[in-house]
Image (tube, helix red, strand yellow):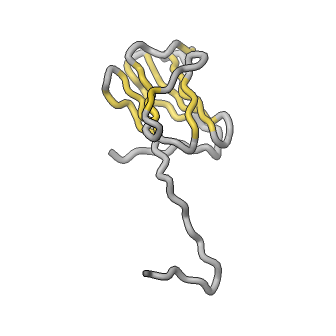
Amino acid sequence: MLGDTFSYTDFNTYTVRIDNNTKVKIYRTTMDVAIVYFTDNNNNKIHIPNGMVMHNNVEKYNLPSRDGKYYVARTSSYTLFYNNKVVFHLENPRIQIVKLGVGYEQCKE
């Protein structure tokens, strides 16, 4: 399942429709933290729907909610479940891009 990207470098909101009257939104608050919150179709914030669970895939625990939102960190990976079905994954690939300077090359060992 290939997906889109959510960026911590801008303030764009990523929105997913859950059902006919519920959306989940991901919004960056800092360069390291985003909030996951829920709205109705009129974009009014609502409580986290029953059956919704945000799981930290790295530390292996379900996130507690705070103020009716989930707070997620850029350095981890998460899965949002609704009635035990995956809504989305927030995956941190944990890779670094190496850009070599002029005159240097990677050694194959």
- Where, quadrant-wise, is the N terminus in this rendering? top left
Q: Quadrant of residue 84?
A: top left
Quadrant of res 3: top left
Q: Give whichever of 16, 103 is nearer the camera.
A: 103
- Residue at image coords 47%, 37%: 59
* Residue at image point 52% right, 18% down: 39
**Above or below, 98 relative to 44:** below
Q: Is residue 82 left or right of residue 38?
A: left
Q: Residue at x 46, y 22 (%)?
A: 23
In this figure, what is the number of numbered marks?
A: 0
Picture coordinates of residue 36 (x, y %)?
Answer: 54, 28
**Quadrant of the snapshot with the C terminus:** bottom left
The residue lying furthest to the bottom in this view is: 103
Q: Nearest the camera: 21 or 57?
A: 57
Q: Position of residue 79 (x, y in %)?
A: 42, 34
Figure check: 62 above or below 22: below
